[in-house]
Amino acid sequence: MNLKRRAAAEFVGTFWLVFAGCGSAVLSAAFPELGIGFVGVALAFGLSVLTMAYVLGPVSGCHLNPAVTVGLVVGKRFALSDLVPYVVGQLSGAVCAAVVLYIIASGSPVLT
């Protein structure tokens, strides 16, 4: 599979992980009332990784985290030449998701 497509898959997967996981923590897990609670946030993170593993696993390996990608390179299970595009895709996906969450959360009267 071509490297652009794999890096784009990492972008989408990391976007989804940050948006769903952090979004559930920021928007639905109030403290001390708990909202969806710690279990709900954990399930949001886990299910977002699970869905991306099924969808993107065959495309890019679904690393979703630069630390995983670097670890695979160090362990010689991933090509060093693919490291930078993967990490750029992952970091840009995380930043885009954070910006979208900020825009959504800034409209909430509860969050100041």
Image (spheres, rainbow, N blue to C red):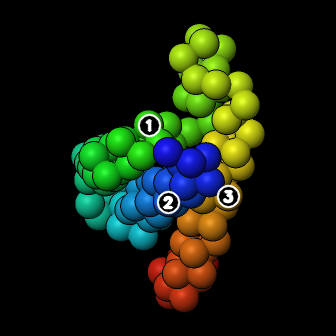
Residue 36: which quarter of the image? bottom left
The Cα–Cα distance between marks 1 and 2, rounded to whole angstroms, is 13 Å
Label 3 belongs to which residue?
A: 92
Q: Earlier in the sequence, mark 1 or mark 3?
A: 1
Q: Identify the residue at image location x=64%, y=25%.
A: 79
Placement of 61 over or under 47, stated as above or below? above
The Cα–Cα distance between marks 2 and 3, rounded to whole angstroms, is 10 Å
Q: Earlier in the sequence, mark 2 or mark 3?
A: 2
State the quadrant of the C terminus.
bottom right
The Cα–Cα distance between marks 1 and 3, rounded to whole angstroms, is 18 Å
Placement of 64 over or under 80, stated as above or below? below
Asked whether residue 56 is in view, the answer is yes
Whether label 1 touches label 2, CB < 8 Å: no
Please give left or right for residue 5 compared with residue 34 in the image: right
Residue 4: which quarter of the image? bottom right
Label 2 belongs to which residue?
A: 12
Front residue (pair 45, 32): 45
What amino acid is labelled 3 in the image?
Ser
Label 1 belongs to which residue?
A: 61
Q: Secondary structure at mark 3?
A: helix
Badge 2, how many Cα within 10 Å: few under 14, some, many 20+?
Answer: many
